C-alpha cells in the first residue's frame, strides 16, 4: 500500500501508456476517467519519438504533463517499447508509493504485468480498444474500452460526429467491464 498523506483519501496511480497502441484522441477522456479512480501521480508514455507516427501524442504531452520515454526499435518484430514499460512498472511497484496502475494499451503482452501488479495487492485499471485480447482484459481489476473515451462532438447543423474535436464532460462516455 502506498504511503499517503493522512489528510488525503485519493488513490495514487501510475499511468503508463503504450503510444504504439493508444491514439492521442483519447487523452482528455482518458484522464477524466482516471480522475474517477484517483490521482495520476506519474504519467509516462512509451514509444519511438524519432518518427512521425506519434505526432498526435507529441501535441498533447505538455498540456497533460505526460513524460515521454524514448525507446528505439532495435530489432524488427521485437517490441522494445513494451519491455521498457514493463521494466518501469516493476521499478514503480517496488517504490511502494502507488495504490494502483493504469495500463493503456490493447496489447496482450501486458497480461502478465497486470497479474503481477494485482498479486502485490494493487488495483489495475486497463484501457484499450475493444479488440484487446480477453486475457489482458481479465487480468485487470477494471477495463475501460477507449473507443468510448475518444474526443467527439456532434455538429449541430448536421448531427455528424467529428473525431478529435474538443470533448465536453457531457459527451465523454465511459463504460467499464469487470472480469
Image (cartoon, rainbow, N blue to C red):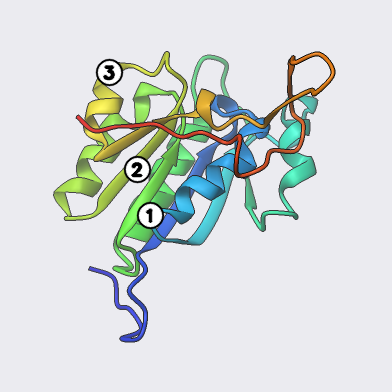
Check disc 2: other Cα within 10 Å, few if <14, some if 14-19, many if 20+. many
> Is residue 137 shown left or right of residue 153?
left
Q: Nearer the viewer, residue 167 or 143?
A: 167
The earlier-in-sequence mark between 2 and 3 is 2
Residue found 74% across the figure and 45% down from its top: 60
Can I make out residue 70 in this image? no
Check disc 1: other Cα within 10 Å, few if <14, some if 14-19, many if 20+. some
Circles 2 and 1, Cβ within 8 Å, touching? The answer is yes
**Can you give x and y, in whole percent of width and height, for residue 171 in the image?**
61, 34
Can I make out residue 75 in this image? yes
**Can you give x and y, in whole percent of width and height, for residue 130 in the image?**
42, 17
User: Which image quadrant: the N terminus?
Assistant: bottom left
Check disc 3: other Cα within 10 Å, few if <14, some if 14-19, many if 20+. few
Label 3 vs label 1, nearer the camera? 1
Q: Secondary structure at mark 1?
A: loop
Circles 3 and 1, Cβ within 8 Å, touching? The answer is no
The earlier-in-sequence mark between 2 and 1 is 1
Name the image quarter holding residue 164: top right
Q: Which residue is mark 3?
A: 134
**On screen, 157 above or below 116?**
above
Residue found 51% across the figure and 27% down from its top: 148
Name the image quarter holding residue 93: bottom left
**Can you give x and y, in whole percent of width and height, for residue 78 in the image?**
49, 21
Which label is found at residue 37?
1
Q: Secondary structure at mark 2?
A: strand
> Is residue 47 shown left or right of residue 18?
right
Amino acid at each position: 500500500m502506498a504511503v499517503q498523506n493522512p489528510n488525503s483519501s485519493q488513490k495514487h496511480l501510475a499511468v503508463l501508456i503504450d503510444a504504439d497502441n493508444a491514439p492521442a484522441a483519447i487523452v482528455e477522456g482518458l484522464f477524466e476517467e482516471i480522475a474517477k479512480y484517483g490521482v495520476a501521480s506519474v504519467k509516462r508514455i512509451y514509444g519511438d519519438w524519432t518518427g512521425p507516427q506519434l505526432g498526435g501524442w507529441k501535441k498533447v504531452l505538455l498540456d497533460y504533463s505526460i513524460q515521454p520515454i524514448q525507446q528505439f526499435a532495435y530489432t524488427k518484430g521485437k517490441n522494445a517499447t513494451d519491455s521498457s514499460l514493463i521494466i518501469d512498472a516493476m521499478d514503480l511497484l517496488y517504490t511502494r508509493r502507488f495504490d494502483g496502475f493504469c495500463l493503456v494499451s490493447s496489447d496482450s503482452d501486458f497480461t502478465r504485468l497486470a497479474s503481477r501488479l494485482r498479486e502485490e495487492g494493487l488495483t489495475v485499471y486497463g484501457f484499450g480498444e475493444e479488440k484487446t485480447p480477453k486475457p489482458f482484459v481479465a487480468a485487470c481489476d477494471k477495463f475501460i474500452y477507449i473507443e468510448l473515451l475518444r474526443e467527439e462532438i456532434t455538429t449541430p447543423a448536421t448531427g455528424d460526429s467529428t473525431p478529435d474535436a474538443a470533448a465536453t464532460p457531457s459527451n465523454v462516455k465511459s463504460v467499464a467491464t469487470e472480469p
